[in-house]
Amino acid sequence: MLLFTKKQLTNLLRYLGIGVKRVPRVIKELRRKGFHVVGLIIPLVLYVGINYTTFFTKEVALWIMSTITLVYFIWEMLRLNIPAVKEFCMRTYGGMMREKEKDRINGSFFYLLGSTLCIYAFNPTVTIASLLFLIIGDFSAALIGLSYGKTKIGNKSLEGTCAMFLSCLLISLVLFRDCNLGEQLAFWGSLAASLVELFNPSWIDDNLTIPCFSGLAIHFMAYRLGTEIVC
């Protein structure tokens, strides 16, 4: 978003064949999802730490994420209960929040909570894959669905779901390339993430459900196939 003015971005989206009525919604979603891309720091640090250091273990990662999640939860409680804090938050990053998040815990907390649970429960490679499914896969689903979606499934679109599945599949094929039957793990994990995104109930945040359920699906399939997930 910082690379383009609003007019330039509008012209680019129109050039890509996105209808005039869809452009404002796509721009708004790009701004919101673009901010969420900051969440890539968690799987990135986990990948580098686990693979290229000796001190950054799964236990260290869990301790750090648990602390961050707790601190953010306290901040959210302050935002929801102290008007001055809420005013500050709305002024600084309120534009990135969905309308329904302004008076309840926002999606960033559920992303942190989901990351913490995944680190605790899953193999590090599965955790990284599951978080990338959420960040990149969900971004793909939103962007393609809002831009080109025509076949509606509830309030989502078939086009967006297919985009998420393909992006998740590409990510997981790379991450599980050294695993026996890694393509099977990639397929079922990507399918689980896409179905959760498509049918996720409104009362629970998909920042929590997508990584947790896709991670569970990968571990379940690894158990059923009798294959080991390589870190």
Image: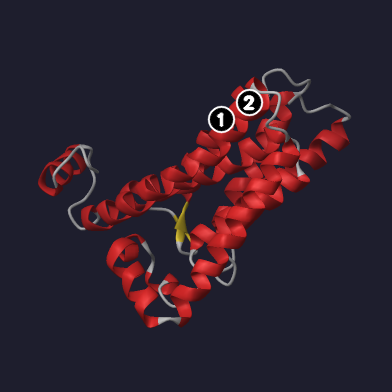
Q: Amino acid at mark 2?
A: Leu
Which disc number belongs to residue 175? 2
Q: Is residue 178 above or below residue 25?
A: above
Compared across the picture, whether 97 is left or right of 166 comes to left
Asked if labels 1 and 2 touch by Cβ distance under 8 angstroms, the answer is yes
Residue that sits furthest to the front in the current view: 55
Which disc number belongs to residue 228? none
Marks 2 and 1, how far apart at CA: 6 Å
Q: In what element is the residue under mark 2?
A: helix
On the image, the x and y values in percent for residue 66 come to 66, 54
Q: Quadrant of the C terminus?
A: top right
Residue 159 seen by the camera: no
On the image, the x and y values in percent for residue 109 come to 54, 61
Picture quarter containing residue 2?
A: top left
- Please name whichever residue, 199 or 10, is drawn nearer the observer in this view of the structure: 10
Picture quarter containing residue 21?
A: bottom left
Picture quarter containing residue 208?
A: bottom right
Q: Is residue 198 above or below residue 231?
A: below
Which disc number belongs to residue 171? 1
Q: Amino acid at mark 1?
A: Ile
